[in-house]
Image (spheres, rainbow, N blue to C red):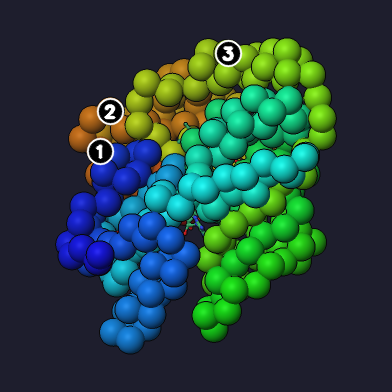
Amino acid sequence: MIQKNVPLKDYTYTKIGGNADYLAIPKSVEELAKAVEFAQKNNLPWMVLGNGSNVLIQDGGIEGLVILTTSLTNMTIENYTITVQAGAPIIEVSQAARDFSLSGLEFACGIPGSVGGAIYMNAGAYGGEIKDVCTYVTVLTSEGKIEKLSADQLGFDYRTSLVPDKNWIVLEVEFELEPGDQTVIKAKMDELTYLRESKQPLEYPSCGSVFKRPPGHFAGKLIQDSDLQGVQIGGAQVSLKHAGFIINKGDATAKDYLNLVHHVQKTVKEKFGVELEKEVRVIGRA
Ligand SMILES: Cc1cc2nc3c(=O)[nH]c(=O)nc-3n(C[C@H](O)[C@H](O)[C@H](O)COP(=O)(O)OP(=O)(O)OC[C@H]3O[C@@H](n4cnc5c(N)ncnc54)[C@H](O)[C@@H]3O)c2cc1C
């Protein structure tokens, strides 16, 4: 069940990243708990990866065990409640809600993360956020206990939650939605998909918006006004289509990516005095 020395670029949206010393892809919560036990027994650090759409894994790979949740995808829908395992793509949950005429997850129809990653990041788009619809989250604690927490125990804030601080593994999530008109829900999702496809460089590997929105500004606008679009280091380029994205033109390394991130931060700081904070999680060995 546990593989050794596995390239992680196959599991990330940037198509960048060195090897995991060990990789587990559990098919059940029991297997996931066993993978954590394996790491603890062997004194290995461990971390969870969902869809790999908000991580930049460094070229030296990841020490210890990476637990990939993408096989944990069970979903049930009862009345207005969707209960779904952490590895399910949030896009599919949003589509299931539409198919059952449930409104509230339209905003998530183009966010390429897993449910667990969406909770970890309090993912959001076009005025909606995970915290608006999430009611309960079941986690595996670092002491090995399974606990069902209410949303207010998750400490959701702009693109953060308490998940990293508490070292929780998100196992399952409940979303409480509202009954809606399927035609209206579909029209909203089509509109958001059109906006995304026309504004974002989805034809290239990337990690989405690299930077958080600085208070009172838009990161993309600051980068654009700093004449940084098209600037390239190695295979990493500030997108010409959306300045907030850094794309992999084919052979970018994590080093290229990070050098470009630092160049953008430095230039924007010099020009506008604004600090751009990374939204993408940079992990692994340099
Ligand atoms: C083209 C593109 C567009 C995007 N658009 C948006 C957008 O509109 N809005 C937005 O908010 N984000 C957006 N993102 C970023 C990303 O999709 C979200 O942040 C998403 O929530 C990350 O989920 P993931 O499963 O890919 O997480 P990963 O990248 O796999 O992991 C991110 C972090 O979450 C942790 N994690 C993942 N699963 C779990 C779990 N089960 N338990 C505990 N921790 C976990 C990981 O350890 C890691 O630290 C976009 C990304 C791309 C590539």
Say if mark 3 contacts mark 1, CB within 8 Å: no
Q: Secondary structure at mark 3?
A: helix
Give the x, y percent position of residue 142.
53, 78
Whichever of labels 3 and 1 marks the residue nearer the N terminus, that label is 3
Q: Say which of 271 and 217 sits in front.
A: 217
Task: For marks 2 and 3, give the one nearer the viewer.
Answer: 3
Type of the residue with mark 1: Ala
In the picture of the structure, the residue carrying the numbered disc 3 is 194
In the picture of the structure, the residue carrying the numbered disc 1 is 252
Residue drawn at the location 44% of the way across and 69% of the way down:
30
Type of the residue with mark 3: Tyr
Vertical arrangement, residue 240 with respect to residue 130, above or below: above
Whichever of labels 2 and 3 marks the residue nearer the N terminus, that label is 3
Q: Quadrant of residue 211?
A: top right
Give the x, y percent position of residue 113.
50, 42
Vertical arrangement, residue 131 with respect to residue 207, above or below: below
Q: Say which of 203 and 173 sits in front.
A: 173
Q: Secondary structure at mark 2?
A: loop
In the picture of the structure, the residue carrying the numbered disc 2 is 249
- Spatial CA distance of label 2 from label 1 is 7 Å
Residue drawn at the location 58% of the way across and 79% of the way down:
145
Q: Quadrant of residue 2?
A: bottom left
Say if mark 2 contacts mark 1, CB within 8 Å: yes
Q: Say which of 247 and 238 sits in front.
A: 247
Residue drawn at the location 21% of the way across and 35% of the way down:
251
